Image (cartoon, rainbow, N blue to C red):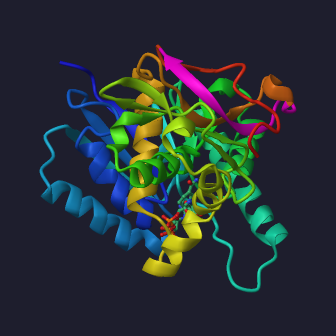
Amino acid sequence: AKDPVRVLVTGAAGQIGYAIVPMIARGAMLGPDQPVILHMLDIEPAAESLNGVKMELIDAAFPLLRGVVATTDVHEACKGVNIAVMVGGFPRKEGMERKDVMSKNVSIYKAQASALEKNAAADVKVLVVANPANTNALILKEFAPSIPEKNITCLTRLDHNRALGQISEKLNVHVGDVKNVIIWGNHSSTQYPDVNHATVTTSGGEKPVRELVANDQWLNTEFITTVQQRGAAIIKARKLSSALSAASSACDHIRDWVLGTPKGSWVSMGVYSDGSYGIQPGLVYSFPVTCEKGQWSIVQGKFELGAHC
Ligand code: NAX
């Protein structure tokens, strides 16, 4: 039997936290034969609610779940963790300037970076979900110099999956048959969802999305803005931001990173730039990546400047 893997979720009493912990405990992140120990961190005002989530995890009697740590102590939370999903952070509130949120997140991510450095497994893999995700990941990387920079990533898989979903709806094909979209840049409305290499598996083989969607105009305009603004559309409809889709995409991100991407396909991940595609080295930026043996690598040669934008 496999040894359990310790998975940290910060902000675990929040919306995404509540959606992701059962997914992890059911094997959606690390596979159906991988036992897990969940470490859940939140802040003091959410301590009681966090304990309620722990009670529910016990009540759900998940066979893969070998233990639950629920705490407001960041050092205890980080002890021995192999995977860290950073969902907690300070949200932008009405009347707040972007720089105010930024300075709050700098101090949160600075403290969490040193707690991870001191307490986590040496090869911990980190996924930052909390916004601004690219920036929070960059702060974490700066303040946790002993964690290899390749091990600190941020979530753009939700945007990637949203793009797959839009194509699947448009063409009326199974979403599992659509692949190789690319999210370039930031997890924000400035991202560029790219379908120029995307394909659909059909009975007649793999076909480019650009061939199947007769309406180029849709791909060049509405598709892009729908993906870029999907988060806002969910907030408008639900009066709450995306949670189940964010949680599911975070599981996809870690699963593919740890277990590998299928042959012939790539996914989008926010990773530190090595200068590929002319992106300033050291920035955390979303690229197409393939993963093998727990390591991602950037897929080269996929940007056709000005081709369709
Ligand atoms: P919630 O407000 O429901 O939950 C956040 C939780 O974090 C709360 O329980 C809060 O007490 C906790 N928290 C705050 N400061 C903390 C700290 N210092 N340490 C530990 N926990 C702390 O937000 P939710 O809807 O779950 O969203 C969480 C984050 O994900 C937000 O920053 C949000 O903007 C971001 N998102 C990122 C997405 C992405 O694709 N990268 C998409 C979904 C989501 O909007």
Against 91, is 119 above or below?
above
Against 100, is 298 above or below?
above
The reply to whether the magenta stretch includes residue 289 is: yes
Residue depicted at 71% across the width and 35% down the height? 144
Specify the quadrant of the image occupied by residue 59: bottom left
Magenta span: predominant SS is: strand
Camera-nearest residue between 24 and 271: 271
Which image quarter holds the N terminus? Answer: top left
Camera-nearest residue between 60 and 39: 60
Residue depicted at 65% across the width and 27% down the height? 147
Residue depicted at 13% across the width and 40% down the height? 63
Find the magenta span and give its range.
279-292
Q: Name the spot of residue 205 as percent of width and height, x first.
A: 37, 22
Q: Name the spot of residue 95 as percent of width and height, x first.
A: 76, 86
> In the rendered picture of this protein, how many numbered marks are placed on residues?
0
Q: Name the spot of residue 129 as percent of width and height, x first.
A: 56, 51
On screen, residue 43 versus residue 152, left or right, reads left
Camera-nearest residue between 193 and 304: 304
Q: Can residue 80 be seen in this view?
A: no
Q: Is residue 302 visible?
A: yes
On screen, residue 285 versus residue 231, left or right, reads right
The reply to whether the magenta stretch includes residue 297 is: no
Q: Name the spot of residue 117 as percent of width and height, x first.
A: 63, 34
Q: In which quarter of the image is ligand 1?
A: bottom right
In the picture as drawn, the residue positioned furthest to the front comes out as 214
In the picture as drawn, the residue positioned furthest to the bottom comes out as 95
